Image (spheres, helix red, strand yellow):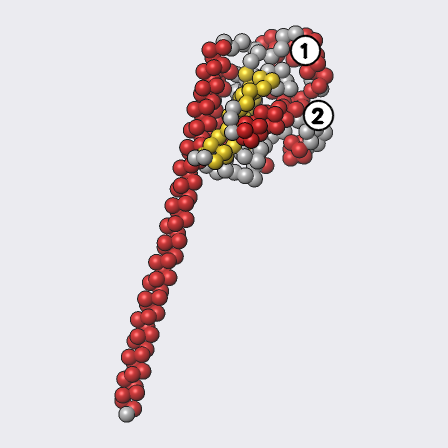
């Protein structure tokens, strides 16, 4: 995960597990973080960018509520191996963020708006490069539950301290509906921007490949011309030898 507001999760970065690299090879993590912060600052919650296969290109947790539940559900996995943890189905924040929201948005090729397992909401949109869906981007939004019973239920499910969750829920600054809608519009703009960058990167790579092919062809053509000149010269010399021998 990427550092956000000084927060670095104890399990480290999940970008090392990225094998798809469609997004990660087109946009470096620092640039992607700057792009995402344009809307995450409006919400102070969480955000993630996924490759088409679910690998993380970016993950950020801004609010104390999201940080606490993410770490708590990571602890439920019972392993130090992040790959095994992601595959376990016990990392509840990942399950909500990827399986329930972002993966569905990729499959449907449309926005998905759900309540996450941690009591807030998730909004995910697909990232398209041309007509191809190359990933998804999402954010969490909404005020954490204020009802103590609901918080205790979440705490029990996540293995978190209910008193700590109550404290974090009360500390969250409520966002207006206007701010949330503005962030959603910004998310769509961000998804489009990422898609355009990937598309340009793809075109650049294709052009480079064509240039390399052309260079190889030119070298082969020049080589053939040189060889033909050598053969012609050899024939001329052979012809002279035959004439002289007669």
Quadrant holding the N terminus: top right
Across and down, in percent, residue 127 comes to: 48, 30
Q: For residue 229, what is the image quadrant?
A: bottom left
Across and down, in percent, residue 70 comes to: 63, 22
Across and down, in percent, residue 151 comes to: 67, 12
- Answer with left or right where residue 224 lies relative to residue 141: left
Q: Are marks 1 and 2 in contact (CB under 8 Å)?
A: no
Residue sitting at 43 percent across and 35 percent down? 130
**193 and 66: which is toward the camera:** 193
Please tell me the numbered disc located at residue 73: none
Q: Name the element at disc 2.
A: loop
Q: Quick check: 87 above or below 177?
A: below
Q: Name the element at disc 1.
A: helix
Q: Which residue is the extreme one toward the front? A: 108
**105 and 158: which is toward the camera:** 105
Residue sitting at 52 percent across and 16 percent down? 44
Across and down, in percent, residue 84 comes to: 67, 34
Residue that numbered label 2 is attached to: 76
Residue 219: tell me if it is visible: yes
Quadrant holding the C terminus: bottom left
Residue 2: tell me if it is visible: no
**172 and 182: which is toward the camera:** 182
Please tell me the numbered disc located at residue 150: 1
Residue sitting at 52 percent across and 24 percent down? 111
Tell which tag, 1 or 2, sits nearer the viewer: 1
Disc with the residue nearer the chain's start (1 vs 2): 2
Q: For residue 118, what is the image quadrant?
A: top right
Q: Quick check: 224 above or below 85?
A: below
Is disc 1 surrounded by few (<14), some (14 to 19) or many (20+) residues within 10 Å? some
Q: For residue 15, what is the image quadrant?
A: top right
Is disc 2 surrounded by few (<14), some (14 to 19) or many (20+) residues within 10 Å? some
């Amino acid at each position: 995960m990427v550092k956000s507001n000084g927060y670095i999760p104890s399990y480290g970065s999940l970008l090392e597990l990225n094998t798809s690299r469609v997004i990660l090879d087109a946009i470096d993590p620092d640039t992607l973080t700057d792009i995402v912060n344009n809307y995450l600052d409006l919400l102070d919650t969480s955000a993630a960018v996924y490759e088409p296969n679910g690998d993380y290109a970016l993950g950020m947790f801004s609010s104390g509520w999201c940080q606490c539940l993410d770490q708590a559900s990571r602890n439920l996995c019972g392993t130090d191996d992040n790959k095994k943890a992601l595959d376990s189905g016990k990392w509840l924040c990942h399950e909500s963020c990827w399986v329930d929201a972002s993966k569905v948005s990729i499959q449907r090729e449309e926005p998905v708006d759900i309540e996450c397992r941690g009591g807030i909401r998730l909004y995910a949109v697909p990232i398209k490069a041309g007509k191809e869906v190359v990933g998804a981007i999402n954010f969490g939004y909404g005020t954490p539950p204020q009802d103590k019973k609901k918080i205790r239920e979440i705490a029990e499910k996540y293995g978190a301290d209910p008193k700590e969750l109550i404290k974090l829920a009360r500390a969250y600054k409520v966002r207006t509906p206007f701010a949330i809608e503005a962030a959603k519009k910004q998310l769509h703009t961000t998804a489009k921007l990422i898609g355009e960058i990937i598309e340009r990167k793809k075109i650049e790579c294709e052009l480079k490949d064509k240039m390399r092919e052309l260079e190889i062809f030119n070298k082969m053509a020049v080589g053939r011309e040189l060889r033909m000149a050598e053969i012609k010269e050899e024939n001329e010399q052979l012809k002279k030898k035959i004439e002289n021998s007669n």
